[in-house]
Image (tube, rainbow, N blue to C red):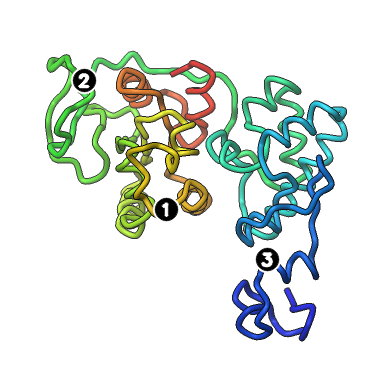
Amino acid sequence: MKCAICKEDFDKSHPWKIHRIKLETYLGQYSPRFNKLTNQPIIFKSLDQYLTEDFDSKTELSQWIKQNKSETIKEYLIQYLIRRKQYKKLSYFPSQFESRTICFPSVSYIVKNWGLDYLIEISEKSGLPLRYTYSNIDFFDNKSLILVDTREQIPLFKNQNIIEIRKLDEGDYELKDKNQNICIDRKSLNDYIGTMSQGFERFERELQRAQDKKKFLIMLVESKYTNLASFNYLPAMRRVKATPDFIFHRVRELLNKYQNFQIVCVDGREAAEQFVSKALKIKTLASEVDFQYYIDNSVF
């Protein structure tokens, strides 16, 4: 990308550093983008957002979808993904969790409203292959004990007969007699924010260790998605400097980089316990399962 003023290489610091023009002002003047619903200039929040998004909110995207035919929507979604793939260097179609964090219909919304073939076509024409199969999934009838890491102060499972406390190298929960090499790292909302901000490099090292051991690591956030998307409005989170957009950006980085990693969120401890007990006994290959998709569709 070249600067429209001096034709030199452009990065987000260039307009102010070289021309003393704010990035927002520069983009509005030399690279204006307009909201597809309102035809008003896109509200600048970050360079990534400004260059890739066509709406200022998912609500506006939903309104635009309601006003257009499925073929028009399909072509838009394809072009959106092509642009995002080029700018963000993506390798795969967004997962259920990822699609909820960007201005794009969730995978479950696409499948429910237009069908699986529609999803497959968008994937193929955008050049972003589906990482997951979105077919029926099966579970083993495995009665093995669930291993719980010694650092878990209040384990999810009240029934002590089905767990065994043991120091685990990665995550908090594993199956003793494994069907697959799955480990689950349980996080509170606070833990999740801390891990994806100050603890990001440490967690990535953990992910790399898991990958080296051919382990599939699932980060389970014990909080509903709306809290993840708007934690800066929660009274207990007012002093947190990180924003939901920043945290989601880091999550997407990891999801794109590591094929042995997923992040899911559930509403409360009961749902977390149910997820752990079923996910550890899944028969379908974990790397082919979009876990958040099945959570949102009440399979877990």
Q: Residue at x 36, y 41 (%)?
A: 217
Horizontal and vertical percent for residue 216? Answer: 38, 40
**Discs 3/2, front:** 3
Q: CB under 8 Å between callouts 2 and 1? A: no
Residue, disc 3: 24
Residue 293 is left or right of residue 53, and the answer is left
Dot 1 amino acid type? Ala
Q: Residue at x 44, y 39 (%)?
A: 233
Q: Is residue 105 visible?
A: yes
Q: Count up the numbered dots.
A: 3
Dot 3 amino acid type? Glu
Looking at the image, tell me whether mark 3 or mark 1 is earlier in sequence order: 3
Horizontal and vertical percent for residue 77? Answer: 76, 40
Indicate whether 102 appears above or below 174.
below
Residue, disc 1: 242
Numbered label attached to residue 157: 2
Q: Is residue 258 visible?
A: no
Q: Residue at x 52, y 32 (%)?
A: 290
Q: Quadrant of the C terminus?
A: top left
Indicate whether 76 appears above or below 291.
below
Looking at the image, tell me whether mark 2 or mark 1 is earlier in sequence order: 2
Crowd around label 2: few <14 · some 14–19 · many ≥20 (10 Å): some
